[in-house]
Image (tube, rainbow, N blue to C red):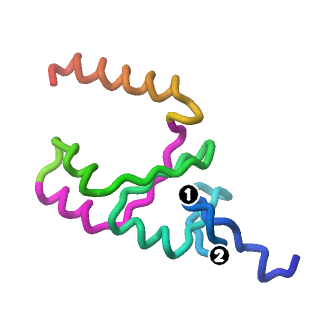
Amino acid sequence: MPAYYKDINQCNICKDEYTSSFIEVMPGNRIYLCQNCVEAARFNFIWICLNCGTAYLRPKTTVMKRRNGYGIKEAIMLGEMKIIQGIYFCIKCNPEGILEQKQQKTNCLGQNGH
């Protein structure tokens, strides 16, 4: 393989295009992003599972409607930013872990009285 093809990989989000653009989420762990997916982040929040590679896109308007705990300033900031976030595991690769985290959060909120 020629050297100039070495850093070209399939986009981890859409898996349709090949690109040399990437972000390194941890040392040696790269997420490749095509230009279309970077642009999609303008209108969607994107989460990618660092364990199995599944990508989740959700419209910002839908997510922002569900965020009750944030003020207007924070909501405006999140609405304007391109956010692609890595998550350690997802419902596809570790459903038990998701349920366990949800239970832990519920227990913590219950103890604080919120």
Q: Is residue 44 left or right of residue 110?
A: right
Look at the image and tell me in which quarter the N terminus lies: bottom right
Q: Quadrant of residue 4?
A: bottom right
Residue type at mark 2? Ser
Helix, strand or loop at label 2? It is: loop
Q: Local crowd at mark 1 within 10 Å, few (<14), some, or many (≥20)?
A: few
Q: Earlier in the sequence, mark 1 or mark 2?
A: 2
Residue 31 against residue 102 in the figure, above or below? below
Helix, strand or loop at label 1? It is: strand
Residue type at mark 1? Val
Residue 38 against residue 13 in the figure, above or below? below
Q: Is residue 87 left or right of residue 70?
A: right
Q: Local crowd at mark 2 within 10 Å, few (<14), some, or many (≥20)?
A: some
Query: Closest to the observer: 17 or 68?
Result: 17
* Residue under numbered circle 1: 25
Return the mark for residue 20: 2
Q: Position of residue 113 (x, y in %)?
A: 15, 20
Tell me which segment is drawn in magenta: 72-90
